[in-house]
Image (cartoon, coloured by chain):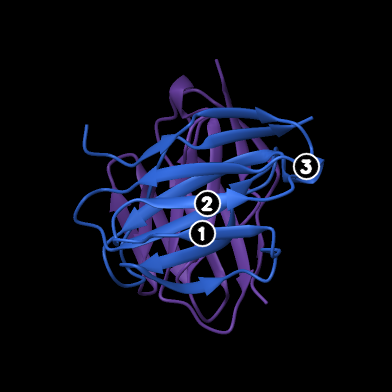
Amino acid sequence: DTGVSQDPRHKITKRGQNVTFRCDPISEHNRLYWYRQTLGQGPEFLTYFQNEAQLEKSRLLSDRFSAERPKGSFSTLEIQRTEQGDSAMYLCASSLDGGGHEQYFGPGTRLTVT
Amino acid sequence: GQNIDQPTEMTATEGAIVQINCTYQTSGFNGLFWYQQHAGEAPTFLSYNVLDGLEEKGRFSSFLSRSKGYSYLLLKELQMKDSASYLCAVSLPPLVFGKGTRLSVIA
């Protein structure tokens, strides 16, 4: 399977704990995106990388959120001191360079903060 | 900002044609995407418009008018498996999505 993969698929954590998610993009894609989706809403942009460089972060991304893509391949998204409002589906997508290429989405990580 | 508006829900009959509209307000974008999302699954790509006009892919077609800030997705010969949410998104990049239109196909 050469699609986008994400791990874990589900995560339940207690408020105040830290969590980290991983995304493995399609191997030849140099762009990697993180989105968050809540029920009844479309995906909401968080941040994206071109190779290892983080090109843009949403204003919605608080300083509790950090993302890395150290070698330009897989990426991690960490949420520190989780809050109940962080409960959502976290989606990763990858694409070739440029805005005209479709983004391929992974299956997502569903986070529940209790 | 990039306000993207779509109807929240639509219902159509199996075998029929349905048009899902999308209006947007944005200062500039590369193109407009349509994605399909079944409940609990990731979005999957349906179509992409960069120029004004109609793009046809099998049972699915998408139209874009940049001057009118308007797009639509046309689904023909509806099947039960087409019941899903349909997401309109402008590509800056990144993608800026509307809230999606939940389509129910009934017999």
Q: In the image, which disc is placed on residue A16?
A: 3
Question: Which amino acid, mark 1?
Answer: Ala
What is the C-alpha distance between the residues marked 1 and 3?
18 Å
Residue bearing the label numbered 2: A77
In the rendered image, is residue A99 in sight?
A: yes
Residue B2 in the image, given as x and y percentages of width and height? 64, 72
Left or right: where does residue A4 sit relative to residue A91? left
In the rendered image, is residue B92 in sight?
A: no
Q: Is residue A15 above or below residue A71?
A: above
What is the C-alpha distance between the residues marked 2 and 3?
16 Å
Chain under label 1? A
Q: Secondary structure at mark 2?
A: strand
Q: Colour of chain B?
A: purple
On the rendered image, what quadrant is the C terminus of chain B found in?
A: top right
In this view, the residue in front, B16 or A25, is A25
Residue visible at 53% across and 55% down in the picture: B88
Residue visible at 69% across and 65% down in the picture: A63
Chain under label 2? A
Q: Secondary structure at mark 1?
A: strand
Callouts 1 and 2 close, C-beta under 8 Å: yes
Q: Which chain comes out blue in the rendered image?
A: A
Residue bearing the label numbered 1: A67
